[in-house]
Amino acid sequence: MNITLTCASGVEKALKSELKRLGYEDAPALNGTLTLNATAYDVARLNISLRTADRVYVKVAEFPADNFDVLYEGVKAVRWEDFLPKDAQIWVNGKCVKSKLFAVSACQGIVKKAISDRLCSVYKTNRLIENGALYQVEFWLFKDVVSVLINTSGAGLHKRGYRDMVGIAPIKETLASALVLYSDYYREHPFADPFCGSGTLAIETARIALNIAGGINRRFAFNDWKNFDQKLYQTAYEQAKDGEQLDRKIEIFASDIDPKAIKLAKRHAQRAGVYDYINFDVKDVANFTCPLSFGTIVTNPPYGERVYDKEQAKECYKMLGKVVKELDRWSCFVITSDKGFENKFGKKCDRDRKLYNSNRECKYYHYYANKAR
């Protein structure tokens, strides 16, 4: 089957690298999506294993559609009976971009009617009862070409299950993983986040270092589907559990000036199964120290929007720059929406990358260690 993976803009390279490590070599990337040919087992494995993907879809059709009749006939032609049982609850959502069919609600109705008419004909019934498992169908209309997909993940894959209480301005788990994967962090090296907030970056780093799969502790949409072989899920789950390396010695430091944030970070780390691997501390960035002589800092400091004002954020950047200057064997990676960050930090970055944090355009600044480790 055709599998489509979605991710945040700018994260495609990290996701592609993940796929290669899992053995999926051929996965073209375009506009926040990657595609590959795979099996039902791979649907389970990708949902459990991936850290930077938003969702895993099965693409069931793609065809040109510039009017409602063509859209209806194209959707109705899909063998929906191969995917949806007689009692399926069908939820349709979509988006229309640069297309003659631009009314999303009208297209939703057409797609739902086409699916219903097909299934009623196949199952020989006047109407669908829709009292079974939920199947989320999505259509993407772009330049008069429609893609029709089934969401196998359900809720976004950033919802790992450990973050039950949200702090101020949290970063998504998927983006946090991408930041770590884009950095020079290696599990044998120390890691630190001096603006840890509710702990997401430190927790995702620990899970990466210990090889704990991204979705190991949650359920997915396909878990409720009667026509999905749940033995495939169990096989993928056991494979992921067998790959965990919980005996690894790792050094992770997470600090924040706010005691409430640290309390929340500890709670999340406990729920994520990595509490014993992270050193938490209530500490101002100005007082950041580490007993180890080299390592990697990855951090998401205040932007001066929801946390602190612009001046306070500026002072945070200046202080971080001073701290990093004294740590010449530490690399530092910072994501922020502040276009003047380099001036405030006090140094031009070695490279940067455009990313989006909650639809806010940001840059991810790379500062590499001055000396060989």
Image (tube, rainbow, N blue to C red):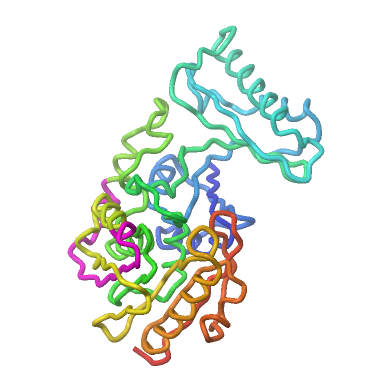
Residue at (46, 37) in percent of width and height: 154
Observer-nearest of 285 and 133 = 285
Residue at (37, 91) in percent of width and height: 372
Q: Residue furthest top?
A: 126
Residue 183 in the image: state x and y as whole percent. 44, 73
Observer-nearest of 83 and 55 = 55
Q: Image quadrant for the C terminus?
A: bottom left
Residue at (49, 45) in percent of width and height: 56
Residue 327 in the image: state x and y as whole percent. 36, 87
* Residue 358 picture quarter: bottom right
Residue 369 in the image: state x and y as whole percent. 41, 86
Q: Is residue 255 magenta?
A: yes
Observer-nearest of 23 and 4 = 4
Residue at (48, 80) in percent of width and height: 318
In the picture, measured across the screen, residue 36 lies left or right of residue 194, that is right
In the picture, measured across the screen, residue 167 lies left or right of residue 102, that is left
Residue 4 in the image: state x and y as whole percent. 55, 47
**Range of magenta residues:** 238-262
Q: Is residue 348 magenta?
A: no
* Residue 76 picture quarter: top right
Instruction: Work out whether 57 lies above or below 105.
Output: below
